[in-house]
Amino acid sequence: MAWDFETDPEFQDALDWMDDFVRREVEPLDHVLGSPYDITNPRNIALVRPLQQQVKDRGLWACHLGPELGGQGFGQVKLALMNEILGRTRFGPVVFGCQAPDTGNAEILAHFGTPAQKKTFLEPLLANEIVSCFSMTEPQGGADPGVFTTKAELQGDEWVINGEKWFSSNARWASFLIVMAVTDPDRPTVDRMSMFIVPKDTPGVEIVRNVGFATEKEGSHAYVRYTDVRVPKDHLLGRRGEAFKVAQVRLGGGRIHHAMRTLGRVKMLFDMMCERAVSRETKGEKLGDKQMVQEKIADAWIQMEQFRLFVLRTAWRIDRYKDYMQVRKDIAAVKAEMPKVLHDIATRALYIHGSLGISSEMPFADQVLQSFHMGLADGPSEVHKVTVARQLLRGYSPSNTLFPSYHVPKLQAEAEAKFAEALEHIDDVI
Ligand SMILES: Cc1cc2nc3c(=O)[nH]c(=O)nc-3n(C[C@H](O)[C@H](O)[C@H](O)COP(=O)(O)OP(=O)(O)OC[C@H]3O[C@@H](n4cnc5c(N)ncnc54)[C@H](O)[C@@H]3O)c2cc1C
């Protein structure tokens, strides 16, 4: 029997250290610093770098990577347990060297990059000396890559890129962008595009504006225009026409890591909800003594724990099969469930806090909005549900009779025939 829901005592020690360190040193950063990706900001340098050094000294830096890339090779289950702690804070992932989208971008550079690409782009990315951007979605559509028109043409020794991308997160801080562009327009959608590494200072890369998230006036999701952007031929990442293959490696890891961090946030919201329930009184009793509040707490815990087990099992499967494609259904299901869990628990937490809950002095309304972020980024839930259903249905064969194979009269007749001989004698006795 290999089912086991326990953490190794040695790793639990590391988690306990992390939990304390994140509460004491990292969470306060969220209140005094701007973007975690603004890594050249002197305030970030002064406060974040020393913490990153402590994490490196503890051997907990960049744990999403294997040892050959400077990480610990902990695997996804341990990473899930770590991300549950880091997900509580905006700065946690950067302090531990495992922030999206750099993790996904590092993963594809590690998988598909040439030695020169790894030296120039991956090494400084892993050291958090630079940050990166993934530039795929276009203004005319994100969920359907068939409508992408940004193109790259080979002219001599250079690729020339033209087009527009939308919601390219962190482009404003990034040193390079990984851009998906059409190179072979006559081929089927899945073979039509290639991936390119584009240094941001390349002439022709223009941030039209930094679009804000929800109520932000200005944010970090760039509307980017590429006009005659020339990159050397060797800036192709992976093979020509294989952008989908490259993206899948990136998105598989990215989605499950988002889910792990989301769990951290959900747990934080749950704890807040419970503290409020045992603190606030109305009509002579604590909120937590009221059955409808108890129901909210019970429902939240049940939803959170189900999701946690689902995330951990998916992480375990990734470790076991070492191939995202084999775990595609599970990752898609986790991705589709994640926004709902965050939405439901953030909403309950908000509501239990009443007017304070909806105020800008508490994190709940922001987390409700973040649930929509989780639903959209890396593909909308509907698309992931389609993946889950298609994969599930592949395991079933159609019945070729008028009534289904499990039609009760048929099952009854079959059972009677099966046991007729054995029961004949017994029935005579009775
Ligand atoms: C916070 C945030 C950060 C992001 N960061 C990045 C980034 O760094 N790089 C990047 O390239 N992109 C990024 N994106 C874009 C993201 O990948 C797209 O928003 C997503 O793929 C959906 O594309 P769209 O917004 O164009 O919506 P559309 O494709 O127009 O879809 C709109 C809606 O239509 C419905 N829908 C779509 N397809 C189907 C379907 N097959 N079946 C049923 N219903 C469907 C869904 O309800 C969907 O929400 C980010 C998005 C967000 C919200």
Image (cartoon, rainbow, N blue to C red):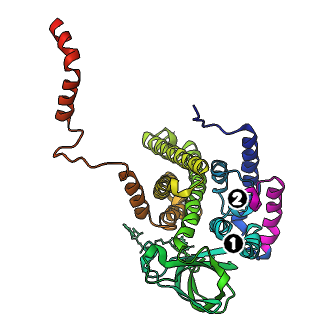
Name the front one of labels 1 and 2.
2
Secondary structure type for disc 2: loop
Q: Residues within 10 Å of mark 2 (few under 14, many from 20)?
A: many
> Is 338 drawn above or below residue 280 in the view shown?
below
Whether disc 2's CB lies below 8 Å from ligand 1 is answered no
Residue range highlighted in magenta? 43-70
Horizontal side of 248 relative to 29 (left or right) equals: left
Quarter-of-image position of residue 6 = top right
* Magenta region includes residue 62: yes
Q: Is residue 350 visible?
A: no
> Is 180 drawn above or below residue 60 in the view shown?
below
Horizontal side of 43 relative to 277 (left or right) equals: right
Whether disc 1's CB lies below 8 Å from ligand 1 is answered no
Residue 39: give x, y in percent of width and height: 74, 73
Q: Residue at x 30, y 48 (%)?
A: 397
Residue 395: give x, y in percent of width and height: 37, 49
Between residues 237 and 172, which one lies in front from this camera angle? 237
Which of pointers 1 and 2 lies earlier in the amino acid sequence? 1
Horizontal side of 410 relative to 316 (left or right) equals: left
Quarter-of-image position of residue 249 = bottom right
> Hey, what amino acid is under mark 1?
Tyr
Residue 311: give x, y in percent of width and height: 55, 49
Q: Which image quadrant: the N terminus? A: top right
Kindly identify which residue carries mark 1.
Answer: 37
Q: Is residue 370 visible?
A: yes
> Hey, what amino acid is under mark 2?
Leu
Between residues 323 and 98, which one lies in front from this camera angle? 323
Task: Give the residue furthest to the top.
Answer: 429
Question: How far apart are the alpha carbons under marks 1 and 2?
Answer: 20 Å
Magenta residues: mostly which secondary structure? helix
Kindly identify which residue carries mark 2.
Answer: 65
> Is 392 drawn above or below residue 41 in the view shown?
above
